[in-house]
Image: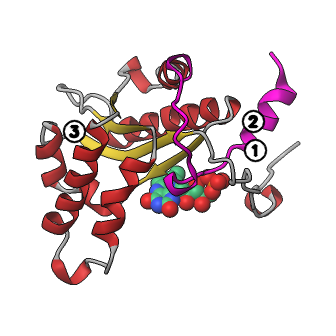
Amino acid sequence: MDAAALDEIIRNRRTIKPPMMGDAPVSEEDLQAILENANWAPTHGLTQPWRFRVIRGDARGELADAFANLYETAIPIDEQKEGKADKLRKMARLAPVVILVCMERQEIEKIRELEEIEAVACAVQNMHLTAASRGLGAFWSTPPFIYKPEMNTYLGLGEKDRCLGIFYVGHPSADTNWPKGRRQPIANRVEYVGN
Ligand SMILES: Cc1cc2nc3c(=O)[nH]c(=O)nc-3n(C[C@H](O)[C@H](O)[C@H](O)COP(=O)(O)O)c2cc1C
């Protein structure tokens, strides 16, 4: 294992949003690596609760329109922000690949829902790191409408399943510099006990 390579990927992984992505397609090899590595995330009870829907090509337009529509119907009017629906109508059209990230609730509900959500988050981090290692930008987006029942209906999810995000993937456009990260030192967030 190459520890230094992993450190570099983790620390240089960045969120790159669709307006910063170019038209260059994501290769099948890169896409499959992203999905395969997601599948290797840890899960309590090996439930592998993640479910992905990969949207490409013209289907992105339909998705973008559906997002705008969901925003306008599922979010109370007094909570809607000016221009947000129009922004949503563009977003999915601007990324070559859009992956809907969902959690399928186990029928027997043996594992806590929180742990199933945590497992999906681990899978998304694997996706993020895989994308970064291949020079791809990615963005985990969680607009509030994804948590609404209307989203489950749109995706055909069960009542206890959840959509946990929209994961946009694409190559940074030619005029996009890879963003610099920013973090508080870890020392501020760790307490050592014993030695
Ligand atoms: C669970 C989760 C949900 C997120 N949802 C959003 C979002 O809805 N909108 C957004 O702009 N960024 C979202 N982000 C991305 C963060 O803004 C981003 O990770 C943070 O700014 C740090 O930047 P970096 O990823 O480049 O290190 C989300 C990140 C996580 C982990």
Query: Which amino acid type is marked by label 3?
Result: Asp
Query: Mark 1 near mark 3, Cβ–Cβ under 8 Å?
Result: no
Residue 194 spot, x, y in % from top left: 84, 45
Residue 76 spot, x, y in % from top left: 17, 75
Q: Residues within 10 Å of mark 2 (few under 14, many from 20)?
A: some
Which of the marked residues, 3 or 2, is nearer the chain's N terminus?
2
Residue pictured at 72% horizontal, 55% vertical = 179
Task: Work out whether 49 lies above or below 67.
Answer: above
Residue 85 spot, x, y in % from top left: 28, 67
Q: Residues within 10 Å of mark 1 (few under 14, many from 20)?
A: some
Task: Return the residue at label 1.
Answer: 12
- Residue 161, numbered circle: 3
Instruction: Give the magenta part as a residue range.
Output: 1-30
Residue pictured at 31% horizontal, 79% vertical = 81
Magenta-span inclusion, residue 54: no
Task: Work out whether 32 lies above or below 4.
Answer: above
Query: Mark 2 near mark 1, Cβ–Cβ under 8 Å?
Result: yes
Q: Work out how far the residue at label 1 is from the one at label 3, CA to CA, in angstroms.
A: 32 Å
Q: Work out how far the residue at label 3 is from the one at label 2, CA to CA, in angstroms.
A: 31 Å
- Secondary structure under the numbered disc 3 in the rendered image: loop
Task: Return the residue at label 2.
Answer: 9
Residue 94 spot, x, y in % from top left: 44, 49
Query: Which amino acid type is marked by label 2?
Result: Ile
User: Which tag is nearer the camera, tag 1 or tag 3?
Assistant: 1
Residue pictured at 68% horizontal, 47% vertical = 174
Q: Nearer the viewer, residue 105 or 76?
A: 76
Residue 33 appears left or right of 58? right
